[in-house]
Image (spheres, rainbow, N blue to C red):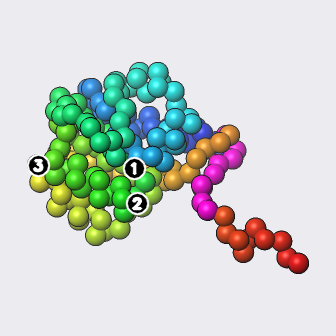
Amino acid sequence: MDVIHAVQRYVARMTEGVSGMKALLLDKETTVMVSMVCSRSQVLEKEVFLFQRLDAQRRGQMLHMKAIVFLRPTHENLKLLQEELREPKFGEYHLFFSNVLKDDVVRSLAQADQFELVRQLRELYADFFALTPSSFSLSLPQNSALTTPLA
C-alpha cells in the first residue's frame, strides 16, 4: 500500500466533494499531514483558496466560503471546533476527522451547530504522517519499555 497516495486520495475526496470556493481549516498535526503529501498548488486546483489553522487567534468572517475542516479528534481540537460552530466564520462546514469519534462527541458537535451549517461529518483513517510510499510515522512518544535494551 502506498501511504502517500492514500493520504492524497483522502485530501482529494475532501476537496472534490465540496463545490465552490473553499477554505481548508486544519490543526497543528493535520497541517503537517497534508503538507507532506500535497503542494499548495495541487490543493488550489481544487478551488481551495484559503488555508487556516483552527487555533489561529485572528480569523475574519468569510460567509461566502465553505470550510473543509480536517482535524485529529483530540479534546483540544473538539473544543475549538465547538467554539467555531457556535460563532461561525464560514457559510457551511464539512467536517473530516483523521480517526474515529465517539458517539457523545458527535452529539456535542451537533448541539454546538446551532446555525445548522455542518453539511457532512466523516471519519477518515489517516492518523499518521506519510514519509515515503511504504513508510509512515505515528508520531507517538517513545515507550521506554520497548526502546530500553534488555541487560
Residue 74: image tag: 2
Between the C-alphas of marks 2 and 3, the distance is 23 Å
Query: In this view of the protein, can residue 62 be seen by the observer?
Result: yes
- Mark 1 and mark 3 in contact (Cβ < 8 Å)? no
Tag 3, which secondary structure?
Answer: loop
- Residue 49 x %, y %: 33, 25
Task: Inspect the image, locate mark 2, and give the three-letter code of the amino acid beneath it.
Answer: Thr
- Mark 2 and mark 1 in contact (Cβ < 8 Å)? yes
- Residue 9 x %, y %: 50, 38
Per the image, the residue denoted by label 3 is 115
Between the C-alphas of marks 1 and 2, the distance is 8 Å
Residue 71: image tag: 1
Mark 2 against mark 3, which lies toward the viewer?
2
- Residue 74 x %, y %: 40, 60
- Specify which label sits upstream in the sequence, 2 or 3: 2
Task: Inspect the image, locate mark 1, and give the three-letter code of the amino acid beneath it.
Answer: Leu
Which residue sits at x=29%, y=42%? 57
- Residue interval drawn in magenta: 133-141
Direction from residue 121 to residue 86 in the image, left or right:
left
